[in-house]
Image (cartoon, rainbow, N blue to C red):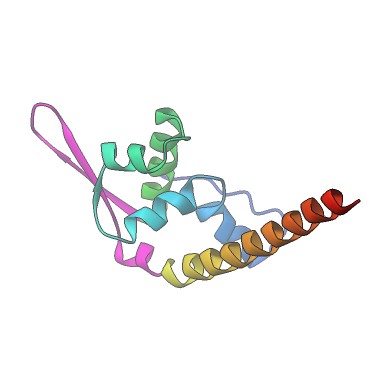
Amino acid sequence: MARKYDWKTGCDVEATLSVIGGRWKPILVCHLLDGKKRYGELRRLTPNATERMITLQLKELEADGIVNRRAYAEVPPRVEYELTEYGLTLESILVQMQEWGREFKSKKQLQEEALGNQSITN
């Protein structure tokens, strides 16, 4: 299934975000960096995402050549997802995003603690 792209800015970051942008795609890809996962595992690992959203995001990642989907002819049905070779090239980007996010969260927590201590002393 081919996706249509409407790159309005011409910025290469926009092309990257069209593939891994959004709330759930980078999280799903991060989970798949650890190896193949069944659909149920991905659902458990992303409890705040709806089943519909996980399915849509996985379909888009598959259409972009980032994820392979393998369905087994079993009862009950079993579906596994894994990153393609091309999908694995996203690892360095996502690791950098994780590191940046970790630092950002730490900075914000320190700021909140400082504000909380400030209000106690006032």
Q: Is residue 95 left or right of residue 5?
A: left
Is 35 positioned to the left or the right of 2 in the image? left
Residue 10, image x, y percentages: 69, 62
Above-or-below relation of 11 to 22: below
Is residue 1 at least partly visible in the picture?
no
Q: Position of residue 33 (x, y in %)?
A: 34, 61
Q: Is residue 87 left or right of residue 110?
A: left
User: Residue 45, how many percent across, how many down?
Assistant: 36, 43
Q: Position of residue 13 (x, y in %)?
A: 63, 64
- Give left or right: position of 25 versus 37: right
Question: Quadrant location of residue 103?
Answer: bottom right
Magenta highlight on residue 71: yes
Q: Is residue 94 magenta?
A: no
Q: How many marks?
A: 0
94 shown above or below 82: below
Task: From the viewer's side, name the closer residue of 71 and 105.
Answer: 105
The answer to whether residue 38 is visible is yes
Q: Which residue is found at the position 8% from the left and 32% from the top?
A: 74
Front residue of 63/44: it is 44
Question: Which residue is at a point 21% across and 39% down the rendered structure image?
Answer: 79
Query: Residue furthest toward the front?
Result: 121
The residue closer to the viewer here, 112 or 73, is 112
Determine the residue located farthest toward the left in the rendered image.
74
Q: Residue at x 67, y 57 (%)?
A: 109
Please report the bounds of the magenta region as a residue range: 67-89
The quadrant of the image that shows the N terminus is top left
